[in-house]
Structures are given as structure tokens and as C-alpha cells.
Image (spheres, helix red, strand yellow):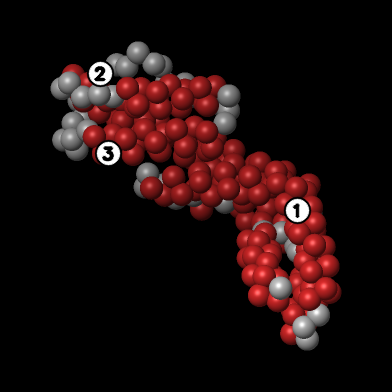
Amino acid sequence: MASALAEEFESALARRNELAQLVPTSSADVELASVRRALEVGDTRGAQRRLEHIRDELARVEEDWEVGRILVTECDLLAETLRELGGDPAPATGPLEEGRRCFAAGRRADAEQLLARAAVALWTVLEPRFFDDLKRLRDRMIESRSAGGDVAPAVKDLREVATELRQRNFVGTVVAYRRLRAFLDRTAPPELGGVGEFSAPLVRYR
């Protein structure tokens, strides 16, 4: 019993640590400290009861802060992609850092507003480089197809990029683009890079 509770405690602690990188977890912290003390003195009933409270509290925190956590993930993905394409996200990260500070202070509404602004700012900086590289990938597709290669998965990903752009979904756009890039990196010879037109138009998000 004590061993099972100790494992559950470690699992709850890991879950808390992940959340605590962004949001306040003070209630769960108090309960975790109580569980630790209960386990130390062999109070398995008390530890089990408090672990149930912790599960409920962490679930509540995850639900309350879900939108903001998604926005942080979105911003981090945009910033990472910008760096990979040789850009610098620093000029657009002011709202992101302020949003993180609001998270830590428990100001959820302010954090979500700032993070939404940060996503738009990061996309604005990323967009020119993104479309330049998307055209490069499209040209590689055309060359690969002309050489007899199977580019059906890439065609699907490119169309998904266009769909996500029309829906103004930054994360969906970048995820589909990354799949497209990974596929062509695996299958298309690096020397390919001719020019041409692909039937699916590139849709710019504004």
C-alpha cells in the first residue's frame, strides 16, 4: 500500500511540476507537502485521502488554464520555427514574456489576452520566411514528381497547410508544414530545387 501511494505521489508531483512552469499551484503544493509527511509517518489513509484531493485540484487547474497553456505551446512552436528558418523571434516576444508573468501571478484573463497577441506578433515575423520556404518545398515536390517520385503524402500536407491558413490556425499550419518538410527531407534529393507551379495555391494569412 505504502509503495503504491509513493508511486502515486511521484506521479502527482511530476504533474504538478509540469503545470507549475506556467501557472500557480499553491493549493496542490500544500496537499503534496501533507502527503509527504503522511507517508513519512506511515499514515496511509491520510496520504490516500490527500492524494485524491490533489488529483481533483490538478484537474481543476488544468481545465482552468487550458486555453493559456495551448497559447503558450503555440507561441513556442512559432518561435522555434522562426529560429529554424534563420529568424529572430526576440522583437515579437514581449507579449509572450509578459503573458508568462501574468500566468505566474494567477492573472488568467490578462495572460490569455497577451499570449494571443504574442501569437499574432510571432506569426507576423515568421510569415515572410515561412512562405519563402514553403515555395522552396513546393518546387522540390515538382522536381521530385517530375523525376518519378511519389509525392502524394506531400501533396496532402501542402493542401492541409492551405486549409489551416484559411482557418487562421497557426499551430495547424506549422504542424502540416513541418510534416511536409520532413517528408521531402527524407525523400527528395537535396540538389532538387527547380521552379514551377503547383496546382494548390498558397494562401497567405492576414
Q: Residue at x 50, y 44 (%)?
A: 78
Give, as a three-letter code, the residue at label 3. Asp
Q: Nearer the viewer, residue 80 or 53?
A: 53
Q: Is residue 98 left or right of residue 159?
A: right
Q: Is residue 76 left or right of residue 196?
A: right
> Mark 1 — residue?
59
Which is nearer the N-term, disc 1 or disc 3? 1
Which is nearer the N-term, disc 3 or disc 2? 3
Instruction: Say which element carries label 3.
Output: helix
Is residue 90 shown above or below 172?
below
Disc 3 to disc 2, C-alpha distance: 19 Å
Give, as a three-letter code, the residue at label 1. Ala
Which is nearer the N-term, disc 1 or disc 2? 1
Is residue 186 shown above or below 100?
above
Q: Which dot, 1 or 3, sits closer to the camera?
A: 1
Count all numbered tags in the image, as a single digit.
3
> Mark 2 — residue?
196
Quadrant placement of the N terminus: bottom right
Q: Residue at x 75, y 47 (%)?
A: 63
Residue at the outermost top position: 199
> Mark 3 — residue?
185
